[in-house]
Amino acid sequence: DVKVTQSSRYLVKRTGEKVFLECVQDMDHENMFWYRQDPGLGLRLIYFSYDVKMKEKGDIPEGYSVSREKKERFSLILESASTNQTSMYLCASSLLSGGSTDTQYFGPGTRLTVL
Amino acid sequence: QKEVEQDPGPLSVPEGAIVSLNCTYSNSAFQYFMWYRQYSRKGPELLMYTYSSGNKEDGRFTAQVDKSSKYISLFIRDSQPSDSATYLCAITDSWGKLQFGAGTQVVVTP
């Protein structure tokens, strides 16, 4: 069964802290994605990766960085957390590169609050 | 202006009613059209996808695409309380990236 796990369901951090969000998939998928989900805005793509050590900016990369050292793990890093980064963060993975109908499988999300 | 527009709702219907959801999009280059369902405190899961104008049925669900009007719809027949969720439309651009609508919250009351 397809599985994407995220390290934390809920996280509370202070402004200026460095924050790591971890995502692991067990499906040997090539592609991994990080989104944030905000009310009224839907899901917005932050970064994605189509191979180990490769990364591409999404629509809203500012204030974030990512790391993919192993195929199954994709980390999102907030170098210096700010209150406007309070959001639900969703990780996803998919099998093929650039697949138009390639299903993205999502993790349960991490609700991050920055105080 | 967002590339994919979707009314956030909430949409409340009685059990057994037909649920009608829709999205509009602005980029005629969009190729594939998907609907995701997201239960509370869960990640989205793919419900249906289609790439051509017309209807596609899967059980109680029908996805409809009108490329000339840039309009997509999802219909849920004989709605059940278990259909209560947020439904997100998603459309792929020519690079294969998904553009999501805001999501419509649906509540089916017994």
Image (cartoon, coloured by chain):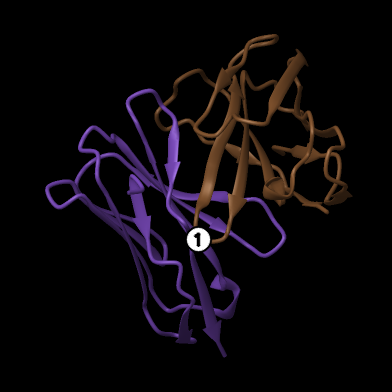
Chain colours: A brown, B purple
What is the quadrant of residue B52 in the picture?
top left
User: A3 or A57, which lies in front?
Assistant: A57
Which of the pair A12/B23 is nearer the observer? Answer: A12
Quick one: which residue is furthest to the front in this view? A16
Expressed as whole percent of the image width and height from the top left, the position of residue B42 reads: 69, 56
Residue at the image position 63 percent from the left and 63 percent from the top: B39
* Rendered residue at 60%/74% (across/down): B82
Q: x, y (%) of residue B78?
A: 42, 79
Where is residue A23? Give x, y as percent. 77, 32
Q: Is residue A112 left or right of residue A49?
A: right
Q: Which residue is mark 1?
A: A40
Looking at the image, residue A80 lies above or below residue B59: above
Q: Quadrant of residue B21?
A: bottom left
- The residue at 54%/79% (across/down) is B107
Residue situated furthest top in the rendering: A53
Using the image, determine if residue A41 lies above or below residue B77. Answer: above
SS at mark 1 in the image:
loop
Q: Nearer the viewer, residue B104 or B48?
A: B104
Q: Label 1 is placed on what type of residue?
A: Gly
| Chain ID, mark 1 | A
Image quarter where the C terminus of chain B lies is bottom right
A32 in relation to B88, above or below: above
Out of A86 and B69, give the one closest to the viewer.
A86
Q: How many marks?
A: 1
- Among the 4 quarters of the image, the one containing residue B31: top left
Q: Is residue A55 left or right of residue A7?
A: left
Q: Position of residue B93 (x, y in %)?
A: 34, 31
